[in-house]
Amino acid sequence: MVKKRSMSAVAMLLIFCMMILTACGGSNSESNNESGGTGNGGKDGKKYKIATVVKLTGVAWFDRMEEGVKEFGKTTGHDTFMQGPQKADAALQVQIIEDLIAQKVDAITVVPFSAEALEPVLKKARDKGIVVITHEADGMVNTDFNIEAFDNLEYGAFLMDNLAKAMGEEGEYMTTVGSLTTKSHMQWEEGAYNRQQEKYPNMKAVARQLETNDDQKIASEKLRETFKAFPNLKGFQGASGNDAAGAALAIEESGLIGKVNVVGTSVPSVSQKYLESGAMSMIGFWDPAEAAKAMNSLAVKVLEGKADEIKEGFDLGVPGYEKLIVKDGKYLYGAAWVGVTKENVTDYDF
């Protein structure tokens, strides 16, 4: 009898311990889901896996974009991360997206190097039920939404206005793009050229749409080559985030400060020294971190079945994207550009 009672007591003790462990486990799970209000995922409590694919990694522009990707994930609780090739190459982007499709991510947000090259693989992603959001790819077909920081032609005109001011509204100038297949770059260049033709008749484009492959060294070489062919060159406008810095470096090294004026898309951390030296007149940009948040926010909206809420005037809750313009149902435009000169470059910390 003593033996039976002893075994019965042990069994009861084991059951009691299991009950405590189960309760503790449930409590920890609940705590993890509610920690700091950031671990809940979407409003329905579901966490989504969202990949952002960029043109290339290891450059200031996309380093800043990755900050936005990480901040969005930390704030919302979704699993967000960024990938990209080490050089701007459409085929490498395609391979990355193929891998993400195989991983069965919930959404892919992408900044295409070549929109045309990515159309087939993004179609494949959407056919697999993956949400696709694009940026810098106005007119993209295989996307749920394409979002731009602004109307691309208007941004190009804005850059030209600043280049014309630096040039005294007269003289020869050149333009560069990262690639002829990068739609946003081509539209910025087109908007700039149209503005020059309409408003600055004493200016002349002697070389247009020279490709730099988003490479600062190539941009520098393009300026040197063009200046050699056109020694009266007075202006440079660059589309890629590396173009203006490359041109400014060539200007410094060639002793052309004050002779050739540089305007283009860049970030302050890259261009501050050139703005302060006078090798660069002005940079335009939008915050790539905020663009990342805008893309990821759109992806979540679609995943939650709320795509129909994205209408004219919609507020994404991201600075510069509070009152969206919507064209043809899925092409979205904010008002997020910024112009920076040596006078206000220290106002920005990226």
Image (cartoon, rainbow, N blue to C red):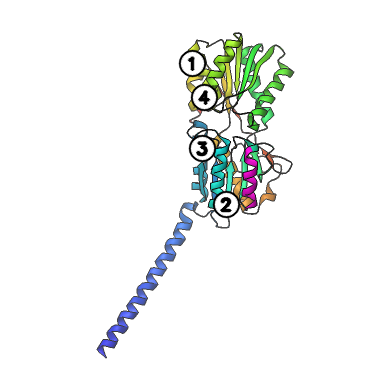
| Element class at badge 2 | loop
Of the residues under marks 3 and 2, which one precedes in the sequence?
Answer: 3
Of the residues under marks 4 and 2, which one precedes in the sequence?
Answer: 2
Overall secondary structure of the magenta section: helix
| Element class at badge 1 | helix
Q: Nearer the viewer, residue 331 or 35?
A: 331
Q: Nearer the viewer, residue 117 or 262?
A: 117
Residue annotated with mark 1: 277
Is 203 positioned to the left or the right of 77 in the image? right
What residue occupies the far left of the structure in this picture? Answer: 2
Mark 4 vs mark 1, CA separation in Å: 18 Å
Please tell me the numbered disc located at residue 85.
3
Residue 79 horizontal/vertical position (percent): 51, 50
Residue 63 horizontal/vertical position (percent): 49, 35
Q: Which mark is in front, 4 or 1?
A: 4
Of the residues under marks 1 and 3, which one precedes in the sequence?
Answer: 3
Query: What's the amino acid at mark 3?
Result: Pro
Crowding at dot 1, Cα within 10 Å, few <14 / some 14-19 / many 20+, comes out as: some
What residue occupies the far bottom of the structure in this picture? Answer: 1
Range shown magenta: 117-128
Q: Which mark is in front, 3 or 4?
A: 3
Of the residues under marks 3 and 4, which one precedes in the sequence?
Answer: 3
Mark 3 vs mark 2, CA separation in Å: 21 Å
Q: Are marks 1 and 3 in contact (CB under 8 Å)?
A: no
Query: What's the amino acid at mark 1?
Result: Ser
Query: What's the amino acid at mark 4?
Result: Gln
Can you say which quadrant of the picture contains the N terminus? bottom left
- At a point 68% along the width and 46% down the height, the residue shown is 310
Note whether residue 148 is visible. no
Q: Nearer the viewer, residue 313 or 274?
A: 274
Considering only vertical position in the picture, is 124 above or below 58? below
Residue annotated with mark 4: 216
